[in-house]
Image: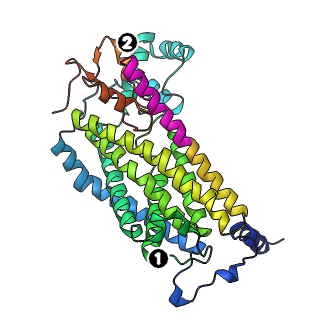
Amino acid sequence: MSRIEGFDWLNEWLWREEYWLPPGIGWKDTHLDEDQGHFPLPRDLLCTLPLAFTFIVLRYVFERVVAVPLSRCLGVKDRVRIQAPSVPKLEAFYKQTSRQPSQPEVLALSKQCGLSQRKIQTWFRHRRNQDRPDNTKKFCEASWRFVFYLTAFLGGLGSLIDTPWFWDQTECWRGYPKQAVASAHYWYYMLEMGFYLSLLLSVSVDVKRKDFKEQVIHHIATLFLIGFSYCANYVRVGTLVMLVHDSSDILLESAKMLHYAVWTRTCDSLFVVFALVFLVSRLVVFPCRVIHTTLLVSLDFYQPFFGYYFFNALLLVLQALHIFWAYLILRMVKKFIFKGKVERDERSDEESDEADEVDLGQKTERSNSKLTSLAHNCVLNNLTNQRNINSRMPKAR
């Protein structure tokens, strides 16, 4: 089989009608006249790639022209960290082998460099801290996402509030799959997918956290869900899914910004609002409105097919993640109420190594506000667990 024949076979297999359309409906049945509007086609998604690169350029300009000056106005400060002395052998090991050497490796490095094991361990602590992103970088990243989520939410809400399926989710399926896509919803989809594609392309230069791999998987899954729902013309319900998620993401990113600016009381209040919005939107609205209509109401309009099972499976997996994240929030709230303490943020920056500085004799103090500690430690809010090192640690002016 030649390469061209193999590609034709794959293309024919991939777009088989039984995968994408209900029984008894073919691609010819989805044809719309020019006056009826635009039917979503897979080739429409090709424009998301140039959109992704456009987002990357816009982000670069935004962070330098808007975010950095804004961070200074809000009082974001970066710590001046102790620089690790130049030791070529340790530097080579750090870059090529491991950032956190094991005890046998420390012993071997000690013999090679003529330094004590204590000094070797101290050098690696300082070296790891050198690579930690500063608060300004994290503020810029959060502010860029905040601007997009706010714009996307307001634009999505404006395009959906007058649609019948926004108020009555039964309308998502009336006439399915022969449903035209309005220009506003088309661009809502393209911009959302282009944005997440830009996040995936820039993930290597973004702030790395311990859940780096999970972030990559999340971006890929999001792109796959958006792309599949568009090709299967689940656009109406897909717009509702995106709107529900953007609503809490706005509060999440704004809480990060205030956290890096050390606006403690405002951050506390905003985190409480974020937690409430998250629990309501992800545990009430999403399953009771969105999943209910895709899983049950849709069966009143067409017989189940592969796309029905696949799309609902993705939504149920997403809901399982919502329940898991909500459990973590509620568990931390419980510890806060009954024990007055919470655990460290498992998603804090991978480079964050401030706990190790305790071993060097430097004392740390926690935030005065317990709600701030809750916000800092919540897995969902992604707020980096920051501690204010005492006066021995110099701070940037």
Q: Label 2 sits on what residue type? A: Asp
Residue under pointer 1: 182
Mark seen at residue 359: 2
Q: Position of residue 354 (x, y in %)?
A: 36, 23
Q: Measured along the vertical axis of the image, is residue 65 above or below residue 365? A: below
Q: Label 1 sits on what residue type? A: Ala
Q: Quadrant of the N terminus?
A: bottom right
Q: Measured along the vertical axis of the image, is residue 112 above or below residue 242? A: above
Q: Is 93 one of the magenta-colored residues?
A: no
Q: Earlier in the sequence, mark 2 or mark 1?
A: 1
User: Is residue 292 toward the left or the right of residue 149 in the image?
Assistant: right
Q: Position of residue 45 (x, y in %)?
A: 54, 69
Element marked by disc 2: helix
Frontmost residue, 130 versus 291: 291
Element marked by disc 1: loop
Frontmost residue, 394 versus 274: 274
User: Is residue 111 toward the left or the right of residue 268 in the image?
Assistant: right
CA distance for labels 2 and 1: 60 Å
Which residue is pictured at 45% across the width and 65% down the height?
166
Mark whose residue sits in front, 2 or 1? 1
Q: Position of residue 346 (x, y in %)?
A: 46, 29
Question: Residue 397's quadrant in the figure?
Answer: top left
Q: Residues within 10 Å of mark 1 (few under 14, many from 20)?
A: some
User: Is residue 266 toward the left or the right of residue 120 in the image?
Assistant: left
Frontmost residue, 113 versus 97: 97
Which residue is pictured at 78% across the width and 70% down the height?
6
User: Is residue 320 toward the left or the right of residue 95 in the image?
Assistant: right
Mark seen at residue 111: none
Question: Do we see residue 377 in this rendering?
Answer: yes
- Extent of the magenta region: 321-347
